[in-house]
Image: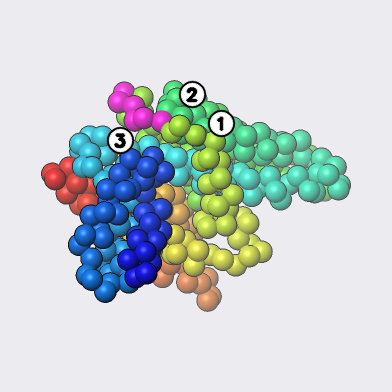
Amino acid sequence: MSHDALEARYRRLLWAYPKRYRHERGAEMIGTLLEAAGPDQRRPTAREATILVLRGLQTRAGTHSAPAAGRGARGALRLAVLLLLAYAGAGSLAESGRVIPRMISQGVDYPSELIHPLVTVTCALALLAVAGGRYLLGLLATLGALAGTLVVTYFSLVGVDVVTGERYYPAIISVRDFVAGESTIWPMPLAALLLLPLLIRPAPGSRRPAFWLLAVPAAVVLLPTDYDTTTGLQPWATVAVLAGALLWVAVDARATIAAGVLLLPVILAWLWLSQFGAWDQPGSDASLWFWTVLSGALALLTAGTLRLRRQARV
């Protein structure tokens, strides 16, 4: 009876491995584990359970066998672009969620706001293209989303004299200052920049790129967007993402590096806002959270890079 219970527990742990891997090697692994088990052992040891789950997750991620350094770096770059585009799409989705209900109930006050849903769709197209390995299309869609965002930002800053009805158009420097302070806009130029090396040396795409669309609503909640004005989840949700990505280095160093890059838009936006005294407001914890996120990004990039290099040497 104890033998059957132990075998059942080992089989449950093997669910960490892909289905095909279990079918091909599951019986052999179970046999080896049972032979090494003690006569009265009823459950896997903590060490066995940890190793089985970790190796299974590494196999799913494709990192159980050591990749070449160049392949690992390209994979990290691709993941970084995907996460940046998911964040950009999340920012645009949050804006669309704010604008569309008001348009339905009150009508369209500013036609330029119709660009928000278009930017959301374009970000989703860029995400799908990059996930599928179509990097040129992804770059073009990313630049299109950035252009749409700049246009809608420009028109959102147009002022109207309530007496004369005369319009006052913003200076380019005002648009620049507004855009540079938005962490959801920075991902687009960063993603476009990181896509350039992938055009020269592409990384393999996903078999099911549509699954990456699920990252967009997740980013709305987990990363700083306008959605947070009513939920109050930030910055704790971002810190939780940071901690999870740091632990994930044991499974996939590429994802840890990509998560470090994902924090760059938040860091750049806070740095820009610091020029205008945003950290000096009474009761503001911006400085504390800035250093927390900056330290986290450096820790992610360092841990991921060291782990990737170690995998390449094995």
The residue most toward the left is 313
Mark 3 falls on what kind of element?
A: helix
Please rate how many residues cluster around mark 1, counting C-alpha atoms within 10 Å: few if below 14, some from 14 to 19, many from 20. Answer: many
| Residue wearing tag 2 | 137
Res. 125 mark: 1
Nearer to us in this view, 93 or 69: 69
Nearer to us in this view, 253 or 179: 253
Nearer to us in this view, 58 or 179: 58
Identified at 30% across, 44% down, the residue is: 25
Q: Which residues are magenta?
A: 200-205
Examine the image and state in which quarter residue 243 appears. Answer: bottom left
Mark 1 falls on what kind of element?
A: helix
Instruction: Find the distance from the CA under tag 2 to the CA under tag 3.
Output: 18 Å
Res. 74 mark: 3
Identified at 26% across, 74% down, the residue is: 40
Instruction: Find the distance from the CA under tag 3 to the CA under tag 1.
Output: 21 Å
Q: Amino acid at mark 1?
A: Leu
Mark 2 falls on what kind of element?
A: helix
Query: What secondary structure is the stretch in magenta mostly built from?
Result: loop
Q: Are marks 1 and 2 in contact (CB under 8 Å)?
A: yes
Q: Position of residue 254 (x, y in %)?
A: 31, 46
Q: Position of residue 166 (x, y in %)?
A: 78, 39
Q: Is residue 292 visible?
A: no
Please rate how many residues cluster around mark 3, counting C-alpha atoms within 10 Å: few if below 14, some from 14 to 19, many from 20. Answer: some
Indicate whether residue 203 is drawn in magenta: yes
Q: Amino acid at mark 3?
A: Arg
Locate the C terminus and report the quarter of the image it occupies.
top left
